[in-house]
Amino acid sequence: MNLQDNIRIVEGFPKKGISFKDITTLIRDKDAFKYAVDKIAGYLKDKNIDVVVGPEARGFLFGAPIAYTLGAGFVPVRKQGKLPYDTLSIKYDLEYGSDVLQIHKDAINKGDRVALVDDLLATGGTTSSVVKLIEQAGGEIVTIDFVIELTDLKGREKLKGYDVLSLIKYDI
């Protein structure tokens, strides 16, 4: 299956000059969604993953069903103030300003084998921050997996030394 056929391209969203890759059309199509989840889960099946970590919000869409398929736990990464218990936090820079990501302090055990799953790799800023959170918690990142990678933004360079998988690659 060519997953790229299930991605809607929206020019000028969220601002002029951006060519937005919309995954809602992929997750709406039951066959394409299942294929994407199965493809990543298949890649992970022999890697003895303890937990799958998914960043808010679209990482939840792929991370949770992949965790379920693997028989692994799922750990959500949320923006500051969204988790009800003690958290680990990391501040990261955005194009204009900064933000904070958090996980529960007890979400990842020391030595847990972790797969980080998200919908999109762009500049790698958010992902590299999540990597730091996972490692701060004591997790071992086995692989980082994406549905889409925007190769021209060179996010993969921020993830050197990690196993990175992307199902669809776009030169923007």
Image (cartoon, rainbow, N blue to C red):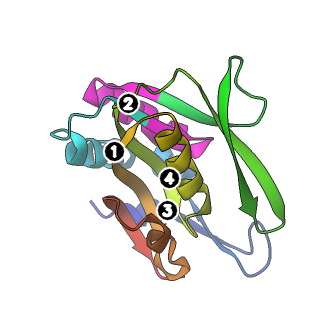
| Extent of the magenta region | 53-74
Q: Residue 10 lies in what quarter of the image?
A: bottom right
Residue under numbered circle 2: 51
Residue under numbered circle 3: 7
In this rendering, which labeled residue sits more in front, label 2 or label 1? 2
Identify which amino acid the numbered label 2 is placed on: Val
Residue under numbered circle 1: 31
Q: Is residue 71 magenta?
A: yes
| Residue 88: percent from left, percent from top | 64, 33
Mark 2 or mark 4: name the one nearer the start of the chain: 2
| Residue 151: percent from left, percent from top | 46, 77
Task: Tell me: residue 31, above or below residue 71.
Answer: below
Residue at the (46%, 52%) spot, across then down: 26
**Real-space CA distance between mark 2 and mark 1, rounded to the nearest whole angstrom:** 25 Å
Mark 1 or mark 4: name the one nearer the start of the chain: 1
Classify mark 2: helix, strand or loop.
strand
Mark 1, other Cα within 10 Å: few <14 / some 14–19 / many ≥20: few
Q: Residue 9 lies in what quarter of the image?
A: bottom right
Residue under numbered circle 4: 119
